[in-house]
Every structure is written in structure tokens, then in C-alpha cells.
Image (cartoon, grey):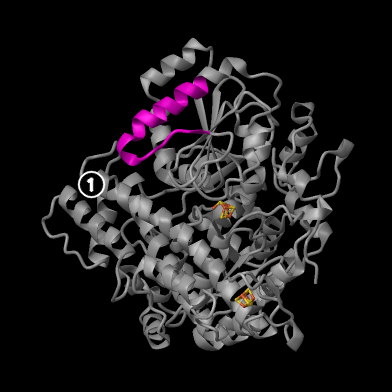
Amino acid sequence: MDTSKRFDKGNGGCPGIQCEANREVLCNSCSEGVITAAHRVQDRSIEPCLFGKGGTCCRNCNMGPCQIIEGVDSMKGVCGADAATVAARNFARIVAGGAAAHMDHGRGVALAFLATAKGETPYEIKDGMKLRETALRIGIDPGEKSKTDLAIEVGEKMVAEFGQQEGVLSFIKRAPAPRQELWEKQGVAPRGVDREVVEMMHRTHMGVDQHYEHILQHAARCALADGWGASMIATELSDIMFGTPVPIRSKVNIGVLKEKEVNVTVHGHEPVLAEALAMAANDPEIVAECKKVGAKGVNLAGVCCTGNEILMRRGLPIAGSFVQQEVVLATGAVEAMVVDVQCIMQGVSPVSSNYHTSLFTTSDKAKITGATHIPFEEHNAMDVAKDILKRAIAKFPERGKHFIPVHEMDVVAGFSHETINYILGGRFRASYKPLNDNIVNGRIRGVAAIVGCDNFRVMDEVHVELAKELIANNVLVLVTGCAATGMGRAGLLSPEAKEMAGDGLKEVLEAVGCPPVLHMGSCVDNSRLLIAATEMVHTGGLGSDISEIPVVGCAPQWMSEKAVSIGQYFVSSGAYVVFGPSFPTTGSKKVTDFCFNEMNEIYGGSWDLAVTANEFANKMIDKIDARRQALGLDKKKERVLFDMAMRRELGSSIPGMGCSPGGH
Ligand code: SF4
Ligand code: MSK
């Protein structure tokens, strides 16, 4: 099944692309001659390879590459490997790649945290309460210890978990007890962060692990070391160091770039760099430099998950999601793009070279041809941040022909697990009980997580259409990553969007005053979703494990290997997870059956595949209803079935909100 969709040629030969703002920039003369991924994806010569897409191309040794067809004896690998072995190995390596990205991110945060605790960085330990709670959770008695001593002890223990060889990772013990027992029984409880990735790469080397089920079980262990290990470490320590997010208003979309300010976009994932830039932007020295060139100040705006990090904690705007990174530069209005790691397309370098824009790489792990490399690490954070900003300011007088579209949208972000607890129950009785009660009484049908990337091979705004359909059916939506930015562009992260919700959900949202789609952060912050699901279990009334609660997940426009690791740790934690528009094992029926069905027998959670928003919604709501029924909560619920006319009407019924995901 070919699930890809192509962009249409838009007006005058400029490519159509998922949002109005993008289209306006790429159709404007300011971007004449600029080539972006939106153009490249239309090139038929880079059509996805069918063997690669289905996971049955093996290049793990130099007797290959071997292209394998399941059930055809003559189409095995030279070594005799069959399609199931190859598809499982490739899937496992995708999980390992994605997990490794989160793990290295987590390690960076843990090292920065430890250095901060020792007073060696410009950051501080902002959330003392969360520090104490975290210490207790990982088996450290806070007692009368000073904040500094406690932070050093927590930091050292977290750093040590990356190289741990035996035992089990500390945060695994946060999971519901039956889940921990299941992981132990299945032999998938992660022992150390790095160990599980190294073992995954070893097992999938030529001639090692060849039984697809055995390979996939270690993929589960590797993913758990990501979700309940490195990603959770990254989120928790970032919160303690930079502040636990609380609801905060801001704006998203390319229109957040400012005409009279020095526009600096921060792109990538690690919050340490973006925090330093945010601190330096208000430094008197920088303010004075801006004045000298006639700029009103520095306008710091995020791209991809760095955007989510600074949006959640500082209320700084997001200029664009993954698919907008080159388009933001093609406005000609950006003085500098500063990148660290992950999801940075090589295309940003040639695009920036069309303008006065400086591209800076900062991580010792990532250089890009054409970019200026300025090494950043937490010990010299402020010096590097100021150096970058001064160079950006110097570019401001060189800004030439440019175009900033008017599109920007108001959002409310910052729904950490702690915030949800607080807004539901209040300061003195913070609890998930009101959420569970409303699920039991049926006002809220269930909870759905929409996570992950946007993708140039998906033209429709599947995230947005899906979210609309879910909330109309009284499903509360939690969102992270670039999906969150897409929701923001479409107006779904504003409290006014409650008008789109079904009656039951709307009643609850009116009582607590939050949007129907809750922005929970970046890719690593999917760990917040694990904690939220666990809290629902602990609160009671909805079963004794994550596999019983009416909660589902999806990544309808996934692109990155990290999304697959995230999906797998949700599945291994007991969630039903739908991916689209394709799944990387479909070349092997055996492996796909294992992921879609047998994993459900083992974990009570499984994978599934959908393409359209409607297909996603049907599958997710069916699963929520099935879990409600198993809990004895139903009474079969009414279903609102969507057609295009209804979607249009829903979008336009809210003041200031058109259907256009471009926003206003
Ligand atoms: Fe081919 Fe086997 Fe080598 Fe893979 S490991 S490339 S299937 S010979
Ligand atoms: S940045 S992993 S495109 S969500 Fe986290 Fe966005 Fe996906 Fe990268």
C-alpha cells in the first residue's frame, strides 16, 4: 500500500505545504530560487525504496546489501537470513538509534545538572521541591541536606545510571507494580541506559541474534531504557534546573519573527543552549549592542523541540516545527539560526546562504558544512551565548529583501504532570482524582496522546484533523513535539478551542479552565505522559495497570527514529499506539503480526497502523471504548462521525480561528 502523499504544485510553481504561512513564504519573491525539502520531496527520483520501507533490505554485512521477500526462498540473504530476521533487526536498530538520541540528550542534561549543582555554570537549581521529591524517588534521603549537597548527590546518581551494568534503572520503580513485575518476568527491565543500546547493536550485528521475537524483546528493553530512563532523567533534571513548567501564554508560527528586532532562531533539542541564549538576550551589553544597529532588541524564537522547551518554561514563541525549519530562513528576516542536535536538516545551510543569515553549530557532536562552529558547553555558556548574539546583531543592518507572514496563533503551553495535578485538584488536594472521576462518569471518554514529528511525505494536517475529531468525541488530548506546534498553529492550544469539544469534555474544561489539547513539551517529555498514565492508575478506579486505563497514543506523521523508540516504550508500558502513514516492518508479516498482535498478549499494549485522520480516530476511540467496557464503565457511547463539511464548520465556529492550520 502506498501511503505517501505528494505536495501539489501551488500557485506559480511554488510547492504546496502544510500551512498557509509556509505557502506564503515559499510563494513570495523573497524566496525565489531557494530550494527546500518541500521542493525536493516532489522529485520522483527520491521515491522511497519498497524494500527499505518495509524493513527487508539488509546491509549488515558486505555480502549484501540483500533485498529479501518473505516466503520466497530464492529471496533470502546470502547468509540465509529471512525477512522476519531482517525486518526485526532493522526495527530494533531504529529503536536503538532513536533511544540513543534521547540517551545522549539525557546524559548532556545530567552532566549540566551536576555541574550546576557544583556552582560551575550560570544556571541554578530552581525547583527545590521537585529536587527533594526526585531524591526520594531514586532512593536518596533528603533529610537535612542542603540544596547543593542534595543536588550533587542526585546528579551523581543520575549520571551513574548511564554506565550502570546491573540492577534496574531508578525511575522504573515509578511504574505501576504489576508492570514492573511483568517487565521482570519478561526479562526486559533495563539495567543501564547505555548498556541496552550497545547490546541492541551487538545482537543485530551479522550472525548474532536471529530469532525475530527475541530481537524484538530486546528492542522493548532498549526503548524502556529510553522512556523510563534517559528521557525521564532529562525531563526531571531539566525541570529542577530550569523550572517545572506551569501554564504560560505565547505564540507560534512564522509570524512571530519581528520586523524591528534581531531575529535569532534556536533549533534542535537540548535546553541548556537555549536557556543560556534566553538569559543573555536581556543582558545590558546585548541590549546596548542592539541599540547601536537600530534594533529594538533580540527576538529569540524556537524551532522544533528547542522551541517546545523555551515555550514551556519561558513563554518564548515558536517560529516553526520540523517542516518549517527551512521556510523560517526563507523569510530572509532571520539574522542567525543556532542549532545543537537532532532534526536539523542539512538543507538549512544552503537556504541560509541565500541570505545574510548566519548558521551556527554548537555541539561537539554535530557540524554542518557551511555553518560556523562555536563550541558550547555549560561551563562557558554565557560567553558563548553572548558571542553568538553579538554576531547575530552585527548581521541586522545587512537584512535585505524579506517577508514575514502575518500568521501567528495564541497558545497556552506548560502542562507538566505537576501542573495537571494542581489544576485538577488545587494546591491543597492536588490529585488526578477529578480526571479519573470524569472518566468514570463518562464526561471524559478517555485520554489520547498525539506525539511526534511532522513529515514532508504527509500533505494533510492529520494531527489537527484527528485532534478535532477526538475532542468532539470527549477524548482529552495530550500533545508533545512538533505535533504540538501544529496544534498550536491551528488554534487547538487555546482555551477558546474548548468550543470544539463534546459536551462532557467541554463541561470539565470550563470548570478547570484549560484547553482541550494540553501541550506537555518536547520529545523527551513524552516521559511526562508515562508519569501521567501511572498517576491515573495510582489514583484508582481505572484498573491496576496502564494496560487497563482508557488511554491511547499515536504518531500520525512520524519521521524520526526517536518516534519509534517512543512508540515502543509506550507499547511495552501497556499502551495501544497507532503510527502512520507507514510502519517500518510491513515487508514481514511475521514481524508485523508480532508488533500488532502478539505484543498485546505480552504487554497488553500493541502497535497499529492508520493513514487518514478518520482512520486514526476510529481505531483510537474503539480501543478507548473497549477498555471502558472491560472496566465495566459502559453503556455504549454515542459517536460523532465526522465529514469534511463538519470539520470546516467546527473550525470557523470559533472567533478568530479559521480552518486553516496557518492561523492568523
Ligand atoms: Fe545479506 Fe545476511 Fe549480510 Fe544481511 S547479514 S547483508 S542478509 S548476507
Ligand atoms: S523535534 S523528533 S521532528 S517531534 Fe523533537 Fe519534531 Fe519529531 Fe524532531
Please identify the residue farthest to the left as the structure is shown: 144
Using residue 172 as the reference point, say whether residue 476 is left or right of it.
right
Q: Main secondary structure of the magenta part?
A: helix
In front here: 27 or 74?
74
How far from the left and from the top, in percent, is residue 629?
Answer: 59, 85
Q: Residues within 10 Å of mark 1 (few under 14, many from 20)?
A: many
386 magenta-colored: yes
How far from the left and from the top, in percent, is residue 156?
Answer: 23, 57
In front here: 83 or 225?
83
Q: Residue at x 75, y 65 (%)?
A: 49
Q: Which residues are magenta?
A: 372-393
How far from the left and from the top, in percent, is residue 200?
Answer: 47, 73
Whether residue 436 is visible, yes or no, is no
Q: Looking at the picture, which amino acid does disc 1 mark?
A: Ala
In front here: 70 or 538?
70
Compared to 508, does 69 lie above or below?
A: below
